[in-house]
Amino acid sequence: METINRLLNGIADVVMWPWSGVSPWPGLVVASLLTSVLLVAIFRVTSNQDEIRRSRNRFLARALELLLFQHDLRVSLTACGRILAANLTYLGHFLVPMAISTVPLLLIFVQLESWFDRRPLKLGESAVIVVELDRSQPAISTFATISASNMVRVDSPAVRIPSRNEVAWRVVASNVGVGWVDVTIDGRSERKSLVVGTDLIRTPVRRERRGFISQWLNPSESPMPKVGPIQRIEVWYPPREICIGYSKIPWPAAAVLLMMVFGLVVGRLAGVRIA
């Protein structure tokens, strides 16, 4: 999974680099367009477009039959059954392409989350660093320290949360750029990146222990060892706002809407039916 993440990180960084302005919209539009092109290509390779067209025509014929003979109850009832069967056959042709496209789509959305779910800290803005400890390290008694690069300064003593076995610190952004914090537990240190600025940039929220799910959901940083005093380090970045006029919308909703529109347009231009 680490190899796949490094490959996808490199591709995403190249795609997003030209759009690293303040507004997230150009990057989101380009990412949605490229994703739509990929999905249309998958549909073209994995679906039988001729069968899809024939199934669609049969469905329309059955619907027209119901319209023409709507005053004949017997014909109408049998036509309803034929419409249902034709519709199920039509939809069945999309199952395999949809199943295959789910895997790259999930990987892409995880990448997009690193860019559009949270934004970097602004100068003077504060954030909380949360460290979840291993069960063998009680938060109330474990010696924990934190150090940071010159991008941020530590602004509070350690706050211990025994019910969650967590230790937390507040940091304040002091310089623009990509920095780090080092968390040391009983002499063993782990590093977490931290981003300060206003540009659109990859903003990884958490770093967790090695595992398939954690590596899939957190592709931007290498995982921590499975054995160690720390389970998770998380930075509470502010949410990134995606706005249309004065209305805020979740970035997944904006991405899905753009992908649907681009998918229909690209599919029409390529002669591929995707819906």
Image (tube, rainbow, N blue to C red):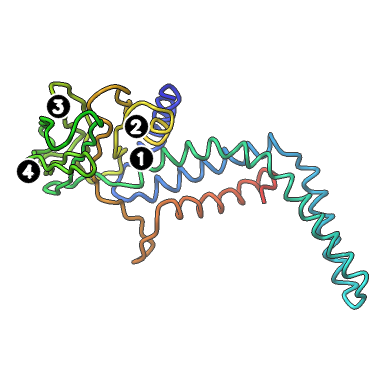
Q: Which residue is mark 3?
A: 184
Of the pair 122 and 221, the residue shown nearer to us: 221
Q: Earlier in the sequence, mark 3 or mark 1?
A: 1
Q: Which residue is mark 2?
A: 220
Query: Could you tell me how far apart the alpha carbons at marks 2 and 4 are, in whole angstroms?
Result: 27 Å
Q: Secondary structure at mark 3?
A: strand
Query: Could you tell me how far apart the alpha carbons at marks 3 and 4 are, in whole angstroms?
Result: 16 Å
Report the amino acid beneath label 2.
Ser
Query: Could you tell me how far apart the alpha carbons at marks 3 and 1 are, in whole angstroms?
Result: 25 Å
Query: Could you tell me how far apart the alpha carbons at marks 2 and 3 are, in whole angstroms?
Result: 21 Å
What percent of the width, then of the height, locates residue 43? 66, 40
Q: Quadrant of residue 99?
A: top right
Q: Secondary structure at mark 1?
A: helix
Q: Which residue is mark 1?
A: 114
Which of labels 2 and 4 is toward the front? 4
Which of labels 3 and 1 is toward the front? 3
Report the amino acid beneath label 4.
Ser
The crowd level at tag 2 (other Cα within 10 Å; few <14, some 14-19, many 20+) is many
Q: Secondary structure at mark 2?
A: loop
What percent of the width, then of the height, locates residue 225? 30, 22
How many marks do you count on the picture? 4
Mark 1 touches mark 4? (CB < 8 Å): no
Report the amino acid beneath label 1.
Ser
Mark 1 touches mark 2? (CB < 8 Å): yes
Question: Does the image show residue 148?
Answer: no
Q: Residue at x 47, y 38 (%)?
A: 108
The crowd level at tag 3 (other Cα within 10 Å; few <14, some 14-19, many 20+) is some
Q: Earlier in the sequence, mark 1 or mark 2?
A: 1
- Position of 10 with respect to 85 (left or right) is left
The crowd level at tag 1 (other Cα within 10 Å; few <14, some 14-19, many 20+) is many
Q: Which residue is mark 4?
A: 156
